[in-house]
Amino acid sequence: MLQDMISKDDVLAAAEQIRQLLPYDEDNVQLMKRALILYRQDSVYRVKAESPTEVSAYVQDVVPVRVTLNLFLMVKSGCSCPSEKICRHVLAAFLYVYATFERVGTFTDDWLEREKLEESKELVRRQFQEKLLPNENSLSSWLAFFEAEFSLWETRTPEGSQTMQGLYYGYLSALKKHAPKKPELKSLYQIHSALAVWLHMFSLIESGKIDPEKDFYSLNPYVEQLMDTIYDSIDKLKTYALSFALDPFLEKTPDVVRRLLLKEDYFQYERLRVFGEIWSSLLSRPKWVAREHEVLKKEAGRRFSPEVQFGKLHLEFLQKNDEVIFREAEHFPPESLPYTFQWLSEISAKKDWKRLKTWYQRIEPIAIGYTKLDKPFKEIRDVISELFFVLNVYVKQTNDHALFERYAAGCLPYTFTEYSHYLYEKRRFAEWIEIHSLVGFSVWEMEKEMIKEISANDPEALIPSYHREVAFYIDQKNRSAYKEAARHLKKLRTLYKKAKKQKVWDRYIKQLSGNYRRLRALQEELQKGKLIDGES
């Protein structure tokens, strides 16, 4: 069934796209009426979901036509009729699909009622254009403009369509049109417009128009795009020597950033990262940091909030009050590990290796504790991998291999890749073999070229692994397993010979044969492999 192949959310999102693509005017009203006639005359048939976001259908008009609906991007929908725009056939097919989830009247009534909104909308727009267009040289003007434009967006957007998608593509697009021309101001404007969209996402959550629990995975891509916009704009600002002309903007920026910080629950990690990045890159002047620290101290006195705690610690970090952070870190749960990466990265970027060493020494228990959490393997592995990405930068610069090895050994098995590469490069082959065995690798699963090199340079390192393999196959107690055991014994004999321990081998094979003398099939395989003679 169609409902099983496509989602209601995608269909409703496509409906909102149609409203944007076909604004209310007489031509589009007539187009909609013709589409409704086709739909109500059952002219739409052979409707099929080709994928979760693509639907094909046929529409019987004067001649039958084939329609393809692209629910993800309705403008890319197509029809075999000559029209190059969205035609009545595409609309009729869409109404058929819409009707499987919602009453068609819900869509068309809203469409036809747009006429009633036009006069009030134009009145608001005229007033807005006359009074509230942003002044390029005033942050207060930008913020007032953002609020006025959000009110306008709410007025012209039906309540059921006030989604994150609509906010991003409708509201944010309107803000972008009025970005300043000067490159520095434009980048700062983009940061503030992204913050405005993020804050108004919370407005929709708080008013019940967005359900963050239900819609988390549809919200997440937009939050990531807002973060990318902020980071890219910061990177562009870094290419300039920030002039004092930006001071009036930057001095008022903490109030906006703090509003996002003090939101609760949702996208906490992302909000803290953005707070830290903006403060570290744009607002790190001592007087601004000290002033904000006082503000957050007062906020902490009114209520406990992890966001406020992080904000205070980040400001301590900017003032290099690391001991204050370390005292707090003694009470950090292991889950806090990812929140330290921003600090580690910043110190690394400044090449303050002495300070960084102290940090790695102090957060080591948190890192090891994180690997003991009851979380999916991949989730822990991803976090530890990010930690080792910044740790490797430090090790390459300082050659502090002892610290690296403590982390690698302490975070096993999540550091298997990093630790095994390290041991191999150091030619510590016995330990390399041992950690492979620890995580369950058999000799035959290890990389052949590496085994070949170890066999040539340190044959004794391989001997314990081959002993384990022989014991494993003998325990299977069947002919094919005995053949595998004999094959591994031949390799083991070669290793003993290379290690110049022939007598040890002789005692071992004699004892092995004696212990399993009742296993006739095994004895036969040992004889076939010339590992023992017939009399043994």
Image (cartoon, rainbow, N blue to C red):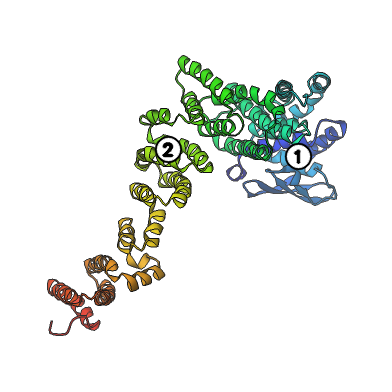
Q: Where is mark 1, residue-wise?
A: 39
Q: Amino acid at mark 2?
A: Leu
Find disc 2 in the rendering and name its residue. 337
* Residue 91 relative to residue 436: left or right: right
Q: Quadrant of the C terminus?
A: bottom left
Depth check, mark 1 against mark 2: the one in front is 2
Towards the viewer: 212 or 366: 366
Considering depth in this image, is 82 or 254 the residue closer to the camera?
A: 254
Q: Say which residue appears at 41% left-offset and 35% top-offset.
A: 335
Counting from the top left corner in percent of width and height, residue 258 is at: 57, 23
Q: Residues within 10 Å of mark 1 (few under 14, many from 20)?
A: many
Q: Quadrant of the N terminus?
A: top right
* Circle 2 residues within 10 Å: few <14, some 14–19, many ≥20: many
Q: Position of residue 487 (x, y in %)?
A: 29, 76
Question: Toward the viewer: 72 or 116?
Answer: 72
Vertical placement of 349 versus 433: above or below?
Answer: above
**Which of marks 2 and 1 precedes in the sequence?**
1
Amino acid carrying label 1: it is Tyr
Residue 292: percent from left, percent from top: 55, 21
Q: CA distance from mark 1 to mark 2?
A: 57 Å
Residue at the image position 67 percent from the left and 29 percent from the top: 192
